[in-house]
């Protein structure tokens, strides 16, 4: 059985999300256990990645709690409960710099998770 984290990560990879980072948020944030952060080069690709994450999660029996920012395609947040996926437009990612904001979080190597 594929985990929620692996399902979301694979969806991001399948749609060519760039510079994918997975943060272990357990004990750091009450929002989620893991964050997946990536970016794309256009609003359309940001939307395609977010849509793929939501579709693959639903196909595998996971609930999509909510999706925010889809219309503008600059920063889309896909809330899957234990996993939150942040899909940024390339120009926005550096500005918000979530990796630095959540600097206490350990980065997970998804090759180890498979």
Image (spheres, rainbow, N blue to C red):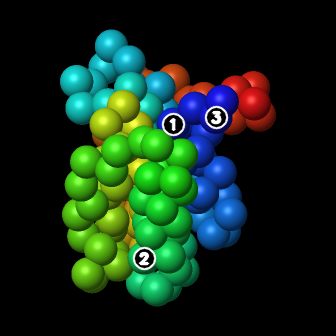
Residue at (47%, 26%) from the top-left corner? 24
Image-quadrant location for residue 110 = top right
Assess disc 3: are there few (<14), some (14-19) or many (≥20) residues with their C-alpha within 10 Å of its C-alpha: few
Location of mark 2 (residue): 47
Q: Is residue 101 above or below residue 94?
A: above
Residue at (40%, 37%) from the top-left corner? 83
Q: Position of residue 68 (x, y in %)?
A: 23, 63
Answer whether residue 74 is visible to the viewer in this image.
Answer: yes
Q: Is residue 89 above or below residue 64?
A: below
Location of mark 1 (residue): 4
- Left/right placement of residue 1 relative to residue 54 reads right
Q: Is residue 20 above or below residue 31?
A: below
- The CA distance from mark 3 to mark 2 is 24 Å
Assess disc 2: are there few (<14), some (14-19) or many (≥20) residues with their C-alpha within 10 Å of its C-alpha: many
Residue at (22%, 24%) from the top-left corner? 30
Cβ atoms at labels 3 and 1 below 8 Å apart: no
Location of mark 3 (residue): 2
User: Could you tell me which secondary element the residue under label 2 belongs to?
Assistant: helix
């Amino acid at each position: 059985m594929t985990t929620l984290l692996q399902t979301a990560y694979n969806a991001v990879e399948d749609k060519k999300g760039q510079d994918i980072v997975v943060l272990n948020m357990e004990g750091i944030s009450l929002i989620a256990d893991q964050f997946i952060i990536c970016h794309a080069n256009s609003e359309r690709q940001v939307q395609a990645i977010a849509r793929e994450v939501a579709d693959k999660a639903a196909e595998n029996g996971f609930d999509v709690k909510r999706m925010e920012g889809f219309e503008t395609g600059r920063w889309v947040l896909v809330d899957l409960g234990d996993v939150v996926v942040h899909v940024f437009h390339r120009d926005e990612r550096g500005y918000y710099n979530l990796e630095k904001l959540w600097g206490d979080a350990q980065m997970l190597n998804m090759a180890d998770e498979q």
